[in-house]
Amino acid sequence: MALVAGAAVAALLSGPVGTGSAGPAASVGSGGSPGSLAAARVTTPYAPRANAPFQHPGVLVGDRQLAFVKGKLAAGAEPWKSAFADLQANKYASLGWQPKPRAEVECGSRSNPNNGCSDERDDSMAAYTDALQWAFTGDQRYADKAIEIMDAWSDVLQEHTNSNAPLQTGWSGANFSRAGELIRHTGAGWSAGSVDRFATMLRTVYEPMLVKGSPTKNGNWELIETDALMGIAVFLDDHAAFDRALTMWRNRLPAYVYLESDGPLPVPPADSGMSGRDRLVKYWQGQSTFQDGLAQETCRDFGHTGWGLEAAAHGAETARLQGVDLWSEGRERLIKALELHTSIDNGATVPDWLCDGSVQTGLGPAVQLAYNEYHGREGLTMPNTEQYVAAHSPFGANYFIGWETLTHTNAP
């Protein structure tokens, strides 16, 4: 079975202005005719976790993916060859990288003041980049560099402060959890004492801030925090934190991407206290017409929207590695959101109903994981997203998104 999502988006873009009161769209888990999202699942659902042991490595990438990519690189296959060459040419891959840890990372709005914010984000991405290089090449120098970076921060960092602290914690925590997971579980020689210090940093500096979420902030915040919390929970074998991350994901995605089946208004964020049309319209950047695939930050800009959608995809991919099928739960919202936004990024005319006919495009490297899941693994047709991937890959590194053409193209 296949879903032609592009046709639905094309109709949405060219159809009459709506108010969100149209009939319900086919929803995940409901009945549906062949070809609908509800009927489209073709893979075996993942079994529930039920506090089963965590699988390692199991944050964003797992053993099968690592072996798959190593095989493609050994064969000189594309796009993995070019994507890995891009990684190796990037500043984050340098063996001369010097970490810049500090005890207090102070980040105000838009990282102003920026007291260690860029340094922490960059160091965490460098650690993840080196961890990938180690995993794909077996070159001990890259494992040692990743360990050097993680040890430097775990020896020093005590807190994140100022208004952007939760988001900063999410960005860096997501990268550090991926790096730590790969280094710890691929025989890189990370000492037990260093692992313990790193785990203590994640448990005492990152996790307490992430579990609170950010219900009244723009939705990319809480989705990024959820992404980081889930990765940290896996690294720490922390079932309570993992379950908290699952709850945050399940609450936030429906409040971030609108479906007409939600009713005339979007779902309010959990614990936000938001209610009423005026309040929700203001929260949705002044957008008062709601149609399938619209995101809470669409009328802000596509860059932040891409962050939110990709953070949700990260959470779903880590959960998949741990036996929880969030991909199925989020299928309709994520496909419709990606097809809507990539259609416009690809050059489609912005309809009058959307953001007064004007949007700021530029999703960035924010589509590969969902495209691989829904198109690659499930066989669903995503023509707009496919066109976007072809035009913009290989995808590089951006804050908490790194090298996903390499890690997730056709990943099993």
Image (spheres, rainbow, N blue to C red):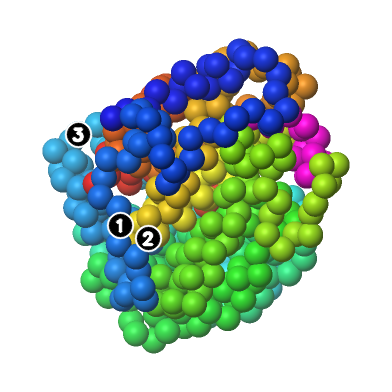
Taking 10 as reference, is 401 above or below it?
below
Which region of the structure is painted magenta? 280-291
Q: Residue at x 40, y 23 (%)?
A: 4
Which of 294/104 is in front?
A: 294
Q: Residue at x 44, y 78 (%)?
A: 238
Q: Position of residue 263 (x, y in %)?
A: 66, 39
Taking 71 as reference, is 357 above or below it?
above
Disc 3 marks which amino acid? Answer: Ala
State the SS at label 3: loop
Q: Nearer the viewer, mark 3 or mark 2?
A: 2
Q: Position of residue 255 (x, y in %)?
A: 64, 49
Task: Kindly indicate the quadrant of the structure image that contains residue 213.
Answer: bottom right
Q: CA distance from mark 1 to mark 3?
A: 30 Å
| Residue under pointer 2 | 324
Which mark identifies residue 77?
A: 3
Number of on-image labels: 3
Task: Say if the magenta span includes residue 287.
Answer: yes
Which of 242/76 is in front?
A: 242
State the SS at label 1: loop
* Label 3, residues with CA under 10 Å away: few <14, some 14-19, many ≥20: few
Q: Residue at x 18, y 36 (%)?
A: 76
Contact flag, marks 2 and 1 (Cβ < 8 Å): yes
- Please name the predominant secondary structure of the magenta segment in the image: loop
Q: Residue at x 82, y 47 (%)?
A: 276
* Label 2, residues with CA under 10 Å away: few <14, some 14-19, many ≥20: many
Disc 1 marks which amino acid? Answer: Tyr
Disc 2 marks which amino acid? Answer: Val
